Image (cartoon, rainbow, N blue to C red):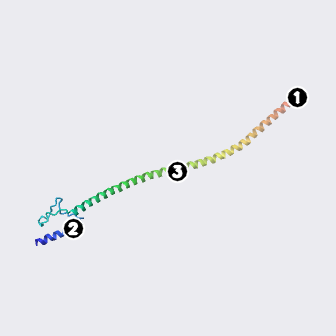
């Protein structure tokens, strides 16, 4: 009876190790003694070499995963910062483009207005210069005529 009980307890432990504990018997302390079932006669059983290898391998894999997760978190944070910087740049560039567009429209309006004024001035200059010159010539003609009449009267 005692043998069957020990055998079933041992088989349960083996089954637990295979199913869910990745080769680690949680009923064992790190010094190799049992915590709850010391009366079943397996007190000298500790971690086997295969279990220790599997445990170290699992620890190494979990540490590597932690490092990879930390690296992914850092990468995501860097990407978020880059996206923030990029959005600021896009907003600034949009503002600059809006200013350039506004300035181009202002310049186009100013150029059109200046062209109109230049055409007006051209017309004024053409007609104004000729009128002034003609007026001076007519006045001089009258002065000469008056001098000619005075010369004939006086002499």
Residue 36 point in image, percent of width and height: 14, 63
Position above or below: 16 against 134: below
Left-right relation of 71 to 102 = left
Contact between marks 3 and 1 (CB within 8 A): the answer is: no
Residue 49 point in image, percent of width and height: 21, 62
Residue 135 point in image, percent of width and height: 77, 37
Left-right relation of 54 to 41 = right
Left-right relation of 11 to 137 = left
Which comes sooner in the sequence, label 3 or label 1?
3
Q: Characterize the local packing of mark 2: few (<14), some (14-19) or many (20 or more) Cα atoms within 10 angstroms.
A: some
Spot the residue most to the front: 49
Residue in the image at 15% along x and 71% along y: 7
Q: Which image quarter: residue 133?
A: top right
* Residue placed under numbered mark 2 in the picture: 16
Image quadrant where one finds the C terminus: top right
Q: Secondary structure at mark 2?
A: helix
Image quadrant where one finds the N terminus: bottom left
Position above or below: 53 against 141: below
Q: Secondary structure at mark 3?
A: helix
Contact between marks 2 and 3 (CB within 8 A): the answer is: no
Position above or below: 56 against 147: below
Q: Characterize the local packing of mark 3: few (<14), some (14-19) or many (20 or more) Cα atoms within 10 angstroms.
A: few
* Residue placed under numbered mark 1 in the picture: 153
Which comes sooner in the sequence, label 1 or label 2?
2
Residue in the image at 29% along x and 57% along y: 63
* Residue placed under numbered mark 3 in the picture: 97
């Amino acid at each position: 009876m005692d043998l069957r009980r020990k055998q079933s307890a041992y088989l349960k432990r083996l089954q637990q190790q295979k199913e869910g504990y990745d080769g680690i018997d949680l009923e064992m302390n790190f010094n190799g003694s049992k915590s709850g079932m010391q009366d079943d006669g397996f007190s000298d059983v500790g971690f086997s070499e295969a279990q220790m290898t599997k445990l170290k391998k699992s620890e190494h894999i979990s540490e590597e995963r932690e490092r990879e997760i930390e690296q992914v978190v850092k990468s995501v944070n860097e990407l978020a910062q880059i996206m923030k910087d990029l959005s600021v740049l896009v907003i600034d560039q949009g503002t600059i483009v809006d200013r350039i567009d506004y300035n181009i429209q202002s310049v186009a309006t100013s150029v059109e207005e200046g062209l109109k004024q230049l055409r007006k001035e051209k017309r004024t200059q053409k007609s104004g210069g000729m009128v002034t010159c003609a007026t001076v010539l007519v006045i001089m003609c009258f002065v000469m005529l008056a001098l000619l009449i005075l010369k004939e009267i006086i002499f």
